[in-house]
Image: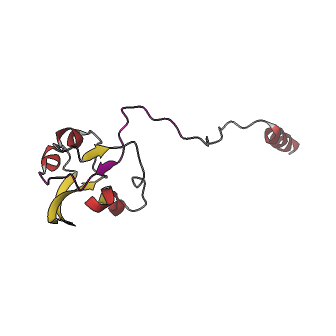
């Protein structure tokens, strides 16, 4: 009966095995791919990004802009491989993969579908 108490007391005063979570952010490599950013002003609605995507992650949807209704990319991050093929094929470079992972961690999977206005 006394042996477990001694073991517990000894363990309380030992140093911890786990590492405290670092307060500084981890530096990401140069080739890291995160959230897609869309510049709606330079998008020409060609749909090349939607055609090249291997997982059909991108759909072209009607979006209201200053110049009227245009077809813009809607991205489903649940299916995205972050392969950057959409970025490579874009003729105006309006789609860019950033190092940002905001809005990719969500509780509801429906929040992973981003309309063009949310990609700016």
Q: Is residue 13 magenta?
A: no
Q: Position of residue 55 (x, y in %)?
A: 20, 46
Q: Position of residue 92 (x, y in %)?
A: 18, 45
103 above or below 2?
Answer: below
Any part of residue 115 in sight: no
Within the image, what quadrant is residue 111 found in? bottom left
Q: Is residue 6 shown left or right of residue 15?
A: right
Q: Which residue is located at x 54 percent, y 41 percent?
A: 25
Q: Residue furthest right?
A: 2
Q: Which residue is located at x 39 percent, y 42 percent?
A: 99
Q: Is residue 35 magenta?
A: yes
Q: Quadrant of the C terminus?
A: bottom left
Q: Nearer the viewer, residue 117 or 10?
A: 117
Q: Position of residue 101 (x, y in %)?
A: 41, 48
Q: Nearer the viewer, residue 6 or 74?
A: 74
Q: Residue furthest top?
A: 30
Any part of residue 73 in sight: yes
Q: How is the image coloured?
A: secondary structure
Q: Main secondary structure of the magenta part?
A: loop
**Residue range corresponding to the magenta coloring:** 25-46
Q: Quadrant of the N terminus?
A: top right
Q: Which residue is located at x 14 percent, y 54 percent?
A: 45
Q: Nearer the viewer, residue 87 or 13?
A: 87
């Amino acid at each position: 009966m006394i042996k477990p108490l001694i073991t517990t007391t000894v363990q309380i005063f030992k140093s911890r095995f786990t590492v405290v979570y670092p307060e500084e952010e981890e530096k990401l490599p140069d080739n890291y791919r995160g959230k897609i950013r869309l510049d709606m002003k330079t998008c020409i609605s060609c749909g090349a990004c939607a055609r090249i995507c291997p997982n059909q992650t991108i759909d072209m949807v009607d979006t209201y802009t200053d110049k009227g209704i245009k077809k813009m990319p809607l991205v489903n991050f649940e299916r995205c491989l972050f392969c950057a093929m959409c970025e490579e094929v874009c003729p105006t470079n309006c789609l860019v993969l950033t190092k940002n992972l905001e809005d990719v961690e969500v509780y509801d999977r429906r929040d992973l579908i981003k309309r063009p206005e949310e990609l700016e």
